[in-house]
Every structure is written in structure tokens, then in C-alpha cells.
Image (cartoon, helix red, strand yellow):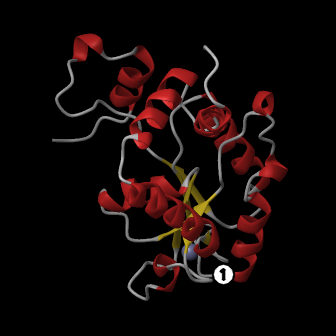
Amino acid sequence: MRAYPKPIQIVVDAFTYLPGVGPKTALRFVFYLLKQPKGTIESMIRALQELQSSIQSCAICKTYTTAEICETCLDPRRDKTVICVVSQPRDIGTIDAAGFQGRYHVLGGTLSPIEGITPDTLEIASLIMRLADEPAVTELVLAFNPDIEGESTIMYLSKILKEKQLRLTRLARGLPVGSDLEFADEVTLGDALRRRWEI
Ligand SMILES: [Zn+2]
């Protein structure tokens, strides 16, 4: 990339820090911002500062919250016997929209030794402590992406939680609505066949 004035280069570097943003996209963002009224950049700066100063991790489930304990953990209508363990805070909205009524625990990722994501970098110790504090919990739903990292995390958690009197469940695999049998992969179709149900 050709050299631009230093202030432009600094912001380009800052944007490329974001996932999925390369130098060209970053430069497009910078040129776009330079054309905006002065107040736009100022309100973005304020929003970013507010983000850093007001967002913290829920003391119980580790999702993002503005209070010490998040609304979901405080909600008395939630089922106290089931915890859905997810990788990222954004997964909570997705699973809630599917009708889950229990509470959550956010690990902050799934195991990937190559990327340096080992059990001690995830919220696994806090999950174990939480289970000791909450004897009402009888089931953990392990809801991760169906990839190698998700599978290793399920294997690791089922190994370390083996001794506990807990029902460990995972999301079923199946065929997406509107999909075509012909294009389904063998693992998904095999799972859908094994877990078929009565009509
Ligand atoms: Zn919470």
C-alpha cells in the first residue's frame, strides 16, 4: 500500500486489528470517515470509550453486562436447573431465540491448542466453581459449533465433569429446514438417520 500521511496510516493500522478487516477495507473506512461531519467521529470516539468503561463480565455467567450480574442470571423466571454452556456471548441471543429457558455460561472460546486456547484460558474453572455453588443445576447443555474445536471442548468437559452427578447433553445434529438431502454431508445425514423419530 502506498504511503499516506501518518494519521491515516495509524487509523488504518487500528482498523486492521479488527477480525476480517484487511488494509484495503481499513483504508476505505478511513476515507469514508474523513468525508463525514466532524461530529460523527466524535460520537464514535465517545461510544468506544463508553464501551470500554461500562461493559464488564457478569460475575456468574461471564457474558457482557453493564452491571455486576447480568439480566439473564437475575431473571427469576429462568430455569435454575439447566445451564447452557456456550463459546461466545453472541451465542446467548441465538439460543434464547430458539426458546431456551435456562441460564448460560460463556467459556470465551473453544479449545484450540494451535491458537493458544487451552483450558486455563477459558472460563472452565469458573464453571466448576459455579456448579459447586449451585447444587440445583442438574443438566449442562454443551452448545458449541459443530467443528473440531467444539468437539474437543465437549470431550474435555465431559472428561472433567464425569464424576459430577450431572446430565451432560449436546445439541443434536440434523438437516437444516429447506435443505436438500442430496447435498447433506454424510456426518449430518448419518446423525439425522440415527436420531430419527416417530411420526
Ligand atoms: Zn450472567
Name the secondary structure under disc 1.
loop
Residue of label 1: 134
Where residue 176 sits, quadrant-wise, is top left
| Quarter of the image where ligand 1 sits | bottom right
* In this view, 69 is above or below 35: below
Percent x, y of residue 169: 53, 52
Q: Residue at x 73, y 59 (%)?
A: 123
Amino acid type at circle 1 is Glu
The residue positioned farthest toward the front in the image shown: 5
Q: Which of 63 and 73 is in front in this view?
A: 63
Question: The N terminus is located in which quarter?
Answer: top right
Determine crowd level at label 1: few under 14, some 14-19, many 20+ residues with C-alpha closer than 10 A.
few
Q: Residue 57 location, x and y as percent?
A: 64, 70
Left/right placement of residue 28 relative to residue 117 reads: left
Residue at 62% over, 83% down: 68
User: Is 90 or 98 nearer to us in this picture?
Assistant: 90
Q: In which quarter of the image is residue 63?
A: bottom right
- The residue nearer to you, when weighing 84 against 163, is 84
